[in-house]
Amino acid sequence: MSLADEAGRTVDDRAAGLDDPYASDPRRPASSALTPWWRWLFLLPGLAAVLYGAHGLLTAGSRVPLGSWLTWFLGSALLHDLVLAPVWVGLGWLSARLLPRAARPAVVVGAAVTGALTLVALPFVLGFGADPANDSFLPRAYGRDLLLVALAVWVVAAGWALVAVRRSRVP
């Protein structure tokens, strides 16, 4: 469905039965998301965890260097908003243009898993904290290992995509 077709719609067919408590009202998208009332109960544990963390951060005194923490916090937000999110959106746009619809979930999962693995392994690959006097501190070829694991992820993703495309073409 194109954006022009979507703009001409007044009511979303998927939300036509508004007796469903999970459906949103397309005429009131913001306020219909607030009901039913018990949805707010899921917000409370997360809000409590954030408040607990903020309290601990602010009352830790000299144990937590707030300047370093603030640099990390703002740096990670900027890294996400200026690098990761645009790359992810670009990859999504590109996959929508080049891949069959059935293959897209496999590619998205493969990209997400590879990205998460890379973020976790990057400090090891770059050798942060390595000590030349202690060879046992970072004893592996982490760059090679990351590439091998990423290759395995993409082999599985490609197999999944191939099976999904073949199944979608079977009458």
Image (cartoon, grey):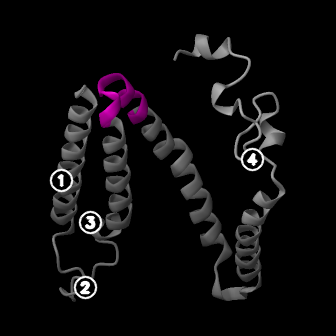
Query: What residue type is disc 1 on?
Result: Leu
- Which residue is under mark 3? 125
Disc on res. 151: 1
User: Does residue 68 belong to the magenta stretch?
Assistant: no
Is label 3 in contact with label 4 (beta carbons under 8 Å)?
A: no
Cα separation, mark 2 vs mark 1, equals: 26 Å
Q: Position of residue 77 (x, y in %)?
A: 59, 54
Query: What residue type is disc 2 on?
Result: Phe
User: Does residue 93 belong to the magenta stretch?
Assistant: yes
Looking at the image, residue 73 sits to the left or right of residue 169; the answer is right
- Which one is in front in this view, the residue at disc 3 or the one at disc 1? 1
| Position of the C terminus by quadrant | top left
- Residue drawn at x 52%, y 50% is 80
Cα separation, mark 2 vs mark 4, equals: 55 Å
Please state the extent of the stretch shown in magenta in the rendering: 91-103
Q: Position of residue 8 (x, y in %)?
A: 68, 11
- Can you say whether 121 is above or below 101 in the image? below
Cα separation, mark 3 vs mark 2, equals: 13 Å
Q: Position of residue 125 (x, y in %)?
A: 26, 66
- Can you say whether 153 is above or below 129 in the image? above
- Which one is in front in this view, the residue at disc 3 or the one at disc 4? 4
- Which residue is under mark 4? 21
| Image quadrant assignment for residue 17 | top right
Label 3 element class: helix
Label 2 element class: loop
Disc on res. 137: 2
